[in-house]
């Protein structure tokens, strides 16, 4: 399993070995835009500690993750003028990267606005 962590895309992003559009960072979590912006504002929240799936998360980490998701969701909806957002964990074959991540997907299946990732990043990083 140690080899998996060494090859983990999200651990590489966390370690700044791979560039990402980071929206927020603290001691425990990293929040960044998903490379696929089919839904403008599609954001990922990852714990910095490597957990493979959501089932591996301890209650404290899970609770902190959802408190952060609430805060980030509000910002996304306000700054991108969205009326809804879906929170989603993938598991099993639908989980492509085996480092737990919570998807925040604005207006899921209601609209596909295909905003450019740089445009989304600029809007979300703008100070009010």
Image: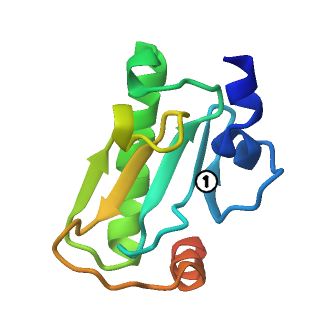
**Residue at the spot 57% in from the left edge and 75% down from the top edge:** 121
Q: How many marks?
A: 1
Identify the residue at the far left of this view. Answer: 110
Dot 1 alpha-carbon crowd within 10 angstroms: few under 14, some 14 to 19, many 20 or more: few
Closest to the observer, 19 or 6: 6
How far across and how far down the image is residue 74, in percent? 35, 59
Q: Dividing the image into 4 quarters, which one contains the N terminus? A: top right
Instruction: Quickly name the residue at label 1.
Output: 24
- Quadrant hosting residue 54: top left
107 in relation to 73, above or below = below
**Residue at the spot 29% in from the left edge and 48% down from the top edge:** 87
13 in relation to 127, above or below = above
- Quadrant hosting residue 2: top right
Report if residue 127 is visible in the image.
Answer: no
Report if residue 109 is visible in the image.
Answer: yes
- Quadrant hosting residue 86: bottom left
60 in relation to 77, above or below = above
**Residue at the spot 75% in from the left edge and 44% down from the top edge:** 12
How far across and how far down the image is residue 46, in percent? 55, 40
**Residue at the spot 32% in from the left edge and 68% down from the top edge:** 77
Left or right: where 95 falls relative to 21: left
How far across and how far down the image is residue 10, in percent? 64, 44
């Amino acid at each position: 399993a140690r080899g998996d962590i060494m090859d983990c895309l999200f651990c590489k992003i966390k370690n700044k070995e791979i560039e990402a559009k980071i929206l927020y960072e603290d001691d425990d979590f990293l929040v960044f835009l998903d490379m696929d912006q089919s839904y403008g504002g599609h954001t990922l929240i990852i714990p910095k500690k490597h957990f493979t799936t959501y089932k591996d998360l301890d209650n404290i980490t899970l609770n902190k993750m959802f408190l952060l998701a609430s805060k980030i969701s509000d910002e996304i909806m306000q700054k991108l003028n969205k009326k809804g957002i879906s929170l989603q964990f993938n598991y099993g074959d639908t989980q492509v990267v085996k480092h737990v991540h919570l998807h925040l997907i604005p207006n899921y299946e209601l609209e596909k606005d295909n905003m450019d990732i740089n445009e989304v990043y600029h809007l979300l990083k703008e100070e009010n």
